[in-house]
Image: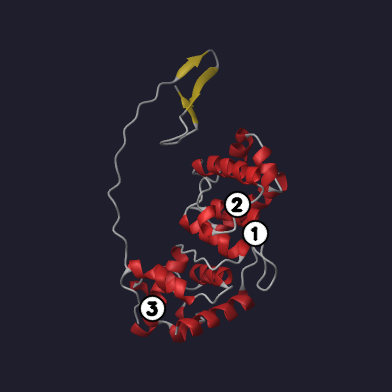
Amino acid sequence: MAASAARALLDHYRATARRLPWRSPPGAPPPDPYHVWLSEIMLQQTTVAAVAPRFLRFVARWPTVGALAAAEEADVMSEWAGLGYYARARNLHACARMVAARGGFPEEEAGLRELPGVGRYTAAAIAAIAFGRDSTPVDTNVERVVARLFALEDRGAIRGAAEAMAPPGEAGDLAQAMMDLGSATCRPRRPGCPLCPLGRHCAARALGQPERFPPKRERPTKPHRHGLALLHRRGGSIFLVRRPPAGLLGGMPGPE
């Protein structure tokens, strides 16, 4: 079933793939690794609709990873304003400098994971999409599609099932196909099962319980934090200090 489901999804992707500024169309040469990396960092905790115009503005200002590496960190932070999670911007700049110093991005997942701000998912996405490696990026959309396709009760089994699906040399297209499917059709609530190209393969649909999968995660208890800020005024000015790079709101200016 895995092979036929993968083929059905890849065929659907080639006919319906979203056109995004950091993507190459199905069948075209792989996109610029710089674009893949930048988009993946921007998309963390941020929607595609919000990222697309900011991505275009960012690459217009810094068209290569070398140009970004040569930028002032303050300029990068300013350009990032509004995307949130400013630690991503600092890691982005540090990563650009490391990549520029070594002459390019590593092509393998293990090497990519050594870069600042690049975790398991991002490394696999860059390796698969930009370099054609047989790596398997598993984000929330991929996780949901695979869990429903195989009616997996155990979250620990999802990655292995996703890895087993990808035909050699097509891991990047399959991952992007799942991302599109999870975003538009295999939604967390009220999935569009009648429109799904995997409908006849899907075990969760056969059970009549697609929303049951994947099983919900246990939410950790959120800590309560208390703080104190002192505001220092002199004349018409307010004195600010920059927070340490690590920790809550690291690197951000605030009152003394």
Q: Which residue is drawn at 53% across and 47% down?
A: 115
Which class describes the residues within 10 Å of circle 3: few (<14), some (14-19), or many (20+)?
many
Q: Mark 2 points at which residue?
A: 38
User: Can see residue 190?
Assistant: no
Position of 171 with respect to 69 (left or right) is left
Q: Which residue is drawn at 46% across and 56% down?
A: 120
Residues marked 2 and 1 touching at CB (< 8 Å): yes
Q: State the mark number for residue 22.
A: 1
Q: State the mark number for residue 150.
A: 3
Secondary structure beneath label 3 = loop
* Residue 63, horizontal then vertical, whole percent: 71, 48
Q: What is the distance, in whole Å, between disc 3 and disc 2 at their CAs?
A: 32 Å
Position of 154 with respect to 100 (left or right) is left
- Amino acid tagged 1: Trp
* Front position in the image: 43 or 111: 111
Position of 14 with respect to 159 (left or right) is right
- Amino acid tagged 3: Phe
* Residue 190, horizontal then vertical, whole percent: 42, 72
Q: State the mark number for residue 216.
A: none
* Front position in the image: 71 or 237: 71
Secondary structure beneath label 2 = helix
Above or below residue 109? Residue 205 is below
Residues marked 3 and 2 touching at CB (< 8 Å): no
| The image quarter in which residue 75 lies | top right
Mark before the other along the chain sequence, 3 or 1: 1
Which class describes the residues within 10 Å of circle 1: few (<14), some (14-19), or many (20+)?
some
**What is the tally of numbered marks visible in this picture?**
3
Classify the position of the N terminus by image quarter.
bottom left
